[in-house]
């Protein structure tokens, strides 16, 4: 019976290809990780900016309400002064009996 034929296989090429594939995967994962970190950082910055804007809106709303209140008080004060002026003018000397329907 014949002798067994043995062959040697060079695994160096396969090892190089495997190492290259691993390096490519590693680079890709590093790039993905860096992109995620930048995206996360950008998202956090945007979130902080949104929160600051919401605080600004809240402050402006309170200021608007305060201004509305001040304007209402001013209008009421001017209305009261006007009514006093009218009452004072109408309360001047008259020849007849006092007006019973007067609200002054």
Image: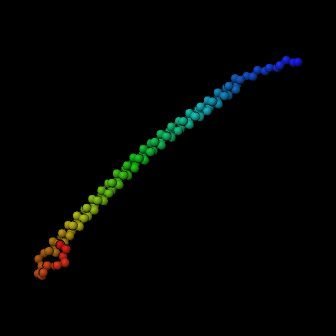
Residue 101, image x, y percentages: 19, 78
Residue 35, image x, y percentages: 53, 38
**Picture layout, residue 66 above or below residue 27:** below
| Horizontal relation, residue 8 to residue 97: left or right | right
Identity of the residue drawn at 40% across and 50% down: 54
Identity of the residue drawn at 59% across and 32% down: 27
Identity of the residue drawn at 56% across and 37% down: 32
Residue 102, image x, y percentages: 18, 76
Q: Looking at the image, which residue sits at the far bottom? A: 96
| Horizontal relation, residue 24 to residue 64: left or right | right
Q: The C terminus appears in which quarter of the rendering?
A: bottom left
**The quarter of the displayed image where residue 25 is located:** top right
| Figure coloring | rainbow
| Horizontal relation, residue 46 to residue 28: left or right | left
**The quarter of the displayed image where residue 64 is located:** bottom left
Q: Looking at the image, which residue sits at the far front? A: 1
**The quarter of the displayed image where residue 80 is located:** bottom left
Q: The N terminus appears in which quarter of the rendering?
A: top right
**Picture layout, residue 64 above or below residue 38:** below
């Amino acid at each position: 019976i014949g002798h067994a034929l043995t062959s040697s296989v060079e695994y160096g090429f396969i090892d190089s290809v495997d190492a290259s594939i691993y390096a490519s995967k590693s680079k890709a994962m590093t790039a993905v990780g860096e992109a995620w970190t930048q995206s996360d950082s950008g998202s956090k910055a945007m979130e902080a900016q949104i929160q600051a804007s919401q605080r600004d809106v809240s402050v402006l709303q309170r200021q608007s309400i305060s201004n509305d209140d001040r304007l209402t008080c001013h209008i009421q004060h001017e209305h009261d002064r006007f009514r006093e002026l009218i009452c004072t003018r109408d309360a001047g000397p008259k020849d007849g009996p006092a007006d019973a329907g007067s609200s002054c």
